Image (cartoon, rainbow, N blue to C red):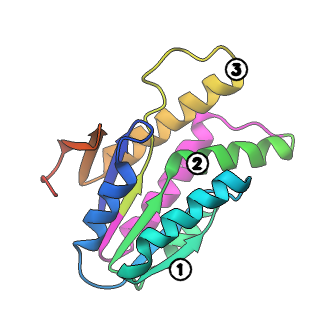
Amino acid sequence: MAKVILITGGSRSGKSIHAQKIAESISGTRTYIATCPYLDEEMTARIRKHRAARESSCWHTIEETIDIAGALRTSEESQVILLDCLTLWINNILYEAEQRGESLDEEAIDTRCREVLDVCARLPGTVIFVTNEVGMGIVPENPASRLYRDIAGRCNQIIASHADVVVFMISGLPLHIKGEKIE
C-alpha cells in the first residue's frame, strides 16, 4: 500500500514546490501526473516552467486531465508519484460532464476519489497529491462556482481522511496537520 501525502493550501502558497521537494527526497523512480490542460499561451508557459523545474531530477511525466486512476495504474513501477493537482482534475471532469450535457454531484466525486484511493492501496512507494483549498473565501455568487467549491471540498476531505500525511501550506510555509512531519 502506497503512503499517501496530501499537500493543500491557497493559490501560490508553495504547494507544488513543497510537494516536489518531498518527492525528490525519496530515492528511486519518479512520475509526475499533470492534470492541467493546455488552455492558452499563458497556461502553456506555466506548464513549460513546471516541466523545466523537474528536468534535472529525472522525472517521467504523464499528462492526464481526466483518468487519474488510470494514470496512477500505469505508474506502478515508480517509487514516488506526484499528482498536481486535484482541483484542476475536478475542473476538468466538471467541464467534460457539462460538454456531455450531464451534471456531476458530490456523490459522483466521492466515487471517483475512492477509485483513486483504491488504486493507491495497490501501489508501492509514495503518492503525493496537490490540491487547493477553494472554500476558504466568500460564498460564490453563482451555482456553477458553488458546485465546484463543494465538489473540490468533498474531494479534499476524502483524500485527506485516507492520507497518511496532510500538510497545509501558508505563504510558503508547511503546517503539518496529520501524520509524521516531513520536510
- Does the magenta-highlighted stretch encompass residue 172? no
Q: What mark, if any, has residue 74 been given in the picture?
A: 1
**Relative to the observer, which residue lies in front, 101 or 37?**
37
Q: Percent from the top left, x then y, of residue 182?
A: 16, 57
Give residue 21's quadrant in the image: bottom left
The C terminus: image quadrant: bottom left
Residue corresponding to mark 3: 143
Q: In terms of secondary structure, where does tag 1 sit?
A: loop
Identified by mark 1, the residue type is Thr
> Disc 1 versus disc 2: distance between alpha carbons?
20 Å
Q: Is residue 135 above or below residue 79?
A: above
Identified by mark 3, the residue type is Pro
Q: Residue at the location (30% across, 52% down)?
A: 163
Q: In terms of secondary structure, where does tag 3 sit?
A: helix
| Label 1 Cα crowd, 10 Å radius (few <14 / some 14-19 / many 20+) | few
Magenta stretch, residue numbers: 102-127
> Disc 3 versus disc 1: distance between alpha carbons?
36 Å
Q: Percent from the top left, x then y, of residue 171?
A: 29, 37
